[in-house]
Image: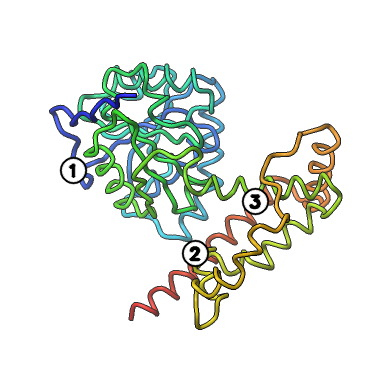
């Protein structure tokens, strides 16, 4: 197959990242609303679009719930939780926007049409990023007239607290657009992985999905409960991962010999039949067991209560890690 060379971004060029003042959030569900809250906390004005008549109330509730956590982390000068307008007309929401974050549901045909519509209405030179968690930009940009300015900017829930964003372009995305988006997210205070190539599921989702499949198999086979699986991570390897991640963790497990010793000594066990990376069939029995297990573990706590506890835990971990990093850099 012949690859079409990536086109440069046509004139006019994107604004300097420091000159951006207004952002369009297209789709303001959980992810898009989380993005809106984060952008507001960084001092930007947000113009949001969503076809649902209830979208305005939903995003207002999300912003109000997220604002205490964002305040605890530190707001940018001039940050205003009310500097947002909600529109049902896409062209109206895009008018004057200097960056666009699309966060529509994960339906390929919807994404293709919506990105084409955004491309048709956004001002020339404005970069358009998609929050997709699974589709490649190559397959989403097929109907867009200017695919060179379409980039994946994949966040993690909640995007107002989790710093990671994975950035990758499609076959027709301009490298300059990828570089601009990466610089833009870094300017916002995000931790950016700029991928060299499109990879199905990106990086973090691939790793999450492997753990998720294994967990479902263990529940399905009666090998572990939902609560046991969660505790095995929160009180086990999860405590090591925030600062060093799984690869460096295994490097340390090798002792003075590091990763080389780890691979040489434990390499044969990689072929042990421990894992079942194929997803199990989602039967009614498995679905019921997982749902009941989560209800048991929640122990009467509502979703908003669990979200508040999650947010406080994320803030505490981030603050401790930042202190450790500052100390090591001193």
Percent coordinates x, y for residue 291 in the rendering = 79, 41
Numbered label attached to residue 317: none
Residue 112 spot, x, y in % from top left: 43, 20
**Element type where label 2 sits in the image:** helix
Give the residue drawn at x 73%, y 54%. 273
Q: Which residue is mark 1?
A: 16
Considering only order in the chain, which callout, 2 or 3, is on the residue closer to the N terminus? Answer: 3
Crowding at mark 1 (Cα within 10 Å: few <14, some 14-19, many 20+)? few
Bin the neighbour count of mark 3 within 10 Å (Cα to Cα): few under 14, some 14-19, many 20 and up: few
Q: Which residue is found at the position 44% from the left and 41% from the top?
A: 154
State how far apart marks 3 and 1 are (Cα): 40 Å
Task: Point out the residue furthest to the left here.
Answer: 11
What residue is drawn where x is 63% and y is 60%?
270
The local secondary structure at tag 1 comes to loop
**Picture layout, residue 152 above or below residue 76:** above
Give the number of marks: 3
Q: What residue sits 51% from the left and 28% below the top?
A: 56
Q: Position of residue 297 (x, y in %)?
A: 79, 53
- Observer-nearest of 85 and 22: 22
In the figure, residue 118 lies in which quadrant?
A: top left
Q: Earlier in the sequence, mark 3 or mark 1?
A: 1
**Residue annotated with mark 3:** 211
Residue for badge 2: 318
Kindly report the distance in space between the C-alpha atoms of the residues bearing marks 1 and 2.
29 Å
Q: Is 22 placed above or below 222 here?
A: above
Q: Earlier in the sequence, mark 1 or mark 2?
A: 1
């Amino acid at each position: 197959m012949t690859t079409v060379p990536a086109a440069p971004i046509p004139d006019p060029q994107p604004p300097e990242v420091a000159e951006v003042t207004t952002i369009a959030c297209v789709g303001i569900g959980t992810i898009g609303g989380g993005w809106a809250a984060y952008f507001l906390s960084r001092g930007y004005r947000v113009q949001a679009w969503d076809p649902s008549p209830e979208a305005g109330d939903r995003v207002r509730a999300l912003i109000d719930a997220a604002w205490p956590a964002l305040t605890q982390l530190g707001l940018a000068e001039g940050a205003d939780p009310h500097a947002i307008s909600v529109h049902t007309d896409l062209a109206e929401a895009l008018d004057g926007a200097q960056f666009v974050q699309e966060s529509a549901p994960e339906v390929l045909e919807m994404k293709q049409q919506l990105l084409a519509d955004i491309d048709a209405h956004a001002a020339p030179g404005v970069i358009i990023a998609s929050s997709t968690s699974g589709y490649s930009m190559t397959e989403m940009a097929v109907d867009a007239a200017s695919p060179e300015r379409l980039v994946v900017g994949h966040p993690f829930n909640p995007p107002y607290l989790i710093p990671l964003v994975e950035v990758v372009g499609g076959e027709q995305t301009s490298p300059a657009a990828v570089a601009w988006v990466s610089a833009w997210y870094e300017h916002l205070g995000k931790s950016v992985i700029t991928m060299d190539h499109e990879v199905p599921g990106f990086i973090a989702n691939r790793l999450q999905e492997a753990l998720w499949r294994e967990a479902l198999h263990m529940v399905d086979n009666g090998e572990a409960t939902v609560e046991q699986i969660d505790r095995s991570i929160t009180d086990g390897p999860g405590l090591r991962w925030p600062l060093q991640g799984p690869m460096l963790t295994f490097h340390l497990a090798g002792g003075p010999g590091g990763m080389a010793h780890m691979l040489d000594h434990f390499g044969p066990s990689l072929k042990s039949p421990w894992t079942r990376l194929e997803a199990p069939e989602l039967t009614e029995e498995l679905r019921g067991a997982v749902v009941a297990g989560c209800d048991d573990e929640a122990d009467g706590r509502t979703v908003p209560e669990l979200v508040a506890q999650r947010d406080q835990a994320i803030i505490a971990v981030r603050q401790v890690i930042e202190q450790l990093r500052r100390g090591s850099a001193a």
